[in-house]
Image (tube, rainbow, N blue to C red):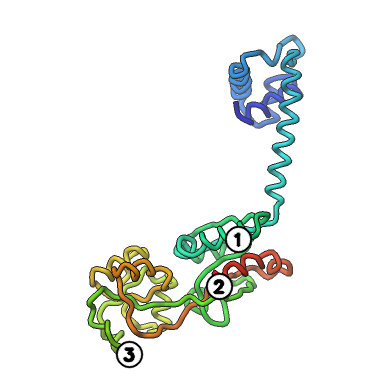
Amino acid sequence: MDLDQLRTALALSRHRTVNRTAAALGLAPSSVSDRIRRLETELGAPLFLRDHTGMHPTGIGAGYLRAAAAALGTLDQAAEMVRAAPGFTVGAQASIANELLPAILDELRVDHPDIQVRLRPETDRGRLLEALERGDLDAVVLLDTGARVGDLGFPTPTTPLEFLDVREVAMTVVVAPGHPLLGHPVSMDEIHRAGSLIGREPRCAFWMATQHWLGPDVDLTAVGGLAQVRDWVATGRGIALLPTFAVRSDLDSDRLAAVDIPAPPLGLRLVWRENHDTPDRLRPLLYALSRA
């Protein structure tokens, strides 16, 4: 049996006819009859008798429905407690959601088991910010820099937003092992002359970070996702500026190598709508992000 069967049986006990029950529940009469029939089959006993005034619970059916109503009431109360529990929905770009946030949210759940945190990954930063502006998200975690949301290079949202950079995200220039840029400190001119620079696509934060560092006219080749960027670099097709967290395993396994040149970090930025109580609700997440 399922809860829909139980709710339909309780509705039938109130409305007395299949047609009135169907209208109340927004179902076809055949669906109501089918649910009652399946429930009775699973229980192995009739729950209703039909006479000229409609459908009436049998003796055993009346007792069962009373118990079912009490059980459903308890379940509904429990569900409402979950929905009413303090919590928030956080959106994040896919690379952050996949690489950084799982461990942070696990730690947050241990420290604050009463807070329900729902994560919404999204490949498109624009859709995340639109959802935040609509109120579908409580906060967004993204990579940015500067004094305003969007100073990295993406469009500035029109809705007033607040933000806090909770930590720096180190950036690393990566190349294939054996590349000529390895083994010595590298200058900006050498980076410009090194050959093809690889990026995901123009809306990507890593692409924008490369342009922010090397200038908007730098020649970048778009190859798709983060995995493709790492593959292209590993096979010697070019070099890339990527967050250190996104290439740590490749560096540890010597699949990629880090060039000896400092690159400006990005900010791991938590963004929310202007609202007097939002920072207080997000404080546990801010703390977890800052100490990750």
Q: Residue furthest top?
A: 51
Disc 2 marks which residue?
Answer: 269
Give how far across and how far down residue 127 sits, in percent: 52, 62
Q: Residues within 10 Å of mark 1 (few under 14, many from 20)?
A: many
Q: Which mark is residue 187?
A: 3
Residue 234 seen in this snapshot: yes
Q: Earlier in the sequence, mark 2 or mark 3?
A: 3
Alpha carbon of mark 2 to alpha carbon of mark 1: how far?
18 Å
Horizontally, is 80 left or right of 38 in the view?
right
Alpha carbon of mark 1 to alpha carbon of mark 3: how far?
41 Å
Q: Assign a secondary structure to mark 2.
A: strand
Residue type at numbered disc 1: Leu
Residue 136 seen in this snapshot: no
Q: Quadrant of residue 95?
A: bottom left
Alpha carbon of mark 2 to alpha carbon of mark 3: how far?
29 Å
Residue appearing at x 66%, y 13% in the figure: 46
Tell me: residue 282, above or below residue 82: below
Q: Which mark is residue 108?
A: 1
Residue type at numbered disc 3: Ser
Give how far across and how far down residue 3 sits, in percent: 64, 31
Q: Which mark is residue 272?
A: none
Residue type at numbered disc 2: Arg
